Image (cartoon, helix red, strand yellow):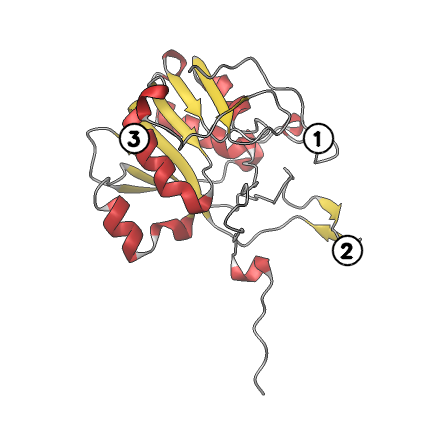
Amino acid sequence: MSRGQNRSSAVMQQRSEPHDSLDDFPTPQWATRALCEFLRDGPPSEPLDMRSVREPAANRGHMVKPLLEYFGHVMASDVHDYGAGYRVRDYLFGPDDQFDRTDWTITNPPFRLAAQFIERALRLSRVGVAMIVRSAFLEGQERYQSLFSVHPPAYVLQFSERCGMFKGRLMRLGTKYIDGDGKERSAATATAYCWIVWLHGVTDTRLRWIGPCRERLERPEDYPADHLEQAPAPDVSEAA
């Protein structure tokens, strides 16, 4: 007997949003720390404390906070005001010369606009660009033709453990919560994520795995007590 397809998002690995959606999927802070440790200690051996970085989709600041732990200067903004105090600006609007150049651009881009974020970031970043995306972003003939064949990344960093991102809230995997129907659920995901890293002058793409590190890099204070309200923004800037 034929059975209907299980369309659970945990099974389908979906992260589809309406065309005008803000694509509000906050990044766990441990995932950003994992990237920064790779950049600092891995083959790039980047002196991050002497570098500047821009986060152009800062959301509530979940990526900004760990970036401040590693980089010397952080610039943060977002197209929407999430109440965290960052400058409101559209990263894709207007000419490049309205932005100051920075050493790095690191962000979790809106999925449907990721290629445009990457292309602008490559033009505005002196050293490199890193984007956290669904691993499925690596697929697709059109994306290969328009992006990866033109701008080959230096590294693809595949998470070896799940990196949980949940719409509109930051939650630790396994956290119990009440969904919109009043049912108790446990935060889980079947979506795989990776960091894609571009370094100017490096076009030989290498695959690396981010080994299990969530337990080491995750901190209790990373998560808001109610999983909804966030603390005020740290001291960052976004130059014109």
Q: Earlier in the sequence, mark 1 or mark 3?
A: 3
Q: Secondary structure at mark 3?
A: helix
Residue that numbered label 1 is attached to: 229
Q: Which residue is mark 3?
A: 122
Q: Look at label 3 and name its amino acid.
A: Leu
Give the side of residue 240 with respect to residue 63, left or right: left
Indicate whether 123 appears above or below 1. Answer: above
Amino acid type assigned to the residue bearing label 1 in the image? Glu
Q: Quadrant of residue 156?
A: top left
Please tell me in which quadrant of the rendered image residue 103 appears. Answer: top left
* Horizontal side of residue 225 vs 103, given as left or right: right
Q: Quadrant of the C terminus?
A: top left
In 3D space, how far apart are the residues under numbered discs 3 and 2 (Cα atoms)? 43 Å
Numbered disc 2: secondary structure? loop
Residue at 49 percent across and 22 percent down: it is 76
Mark 2 neighbour class, 10 Å CA radius: few under 14, some 14 to 19, many 20 or more: few
- Which residue is denoted by mark 2 in the rendering? 181
Q: Residue at x 59, y 80 (%)?
A: 3
12 shown above or below 101: below
Instruction: For the N terminus, give its image quadrant.
Output: bottom right
Q: Residue furthest bottom?
A: 1
Q: CA distance from mark 2 to mark 1?
A: 21 Å
- Mark 1 crowd level (few <14, some 14–19, many ≥20, 10 Å Cα): some
Residue 186 visible (yes or no): yes
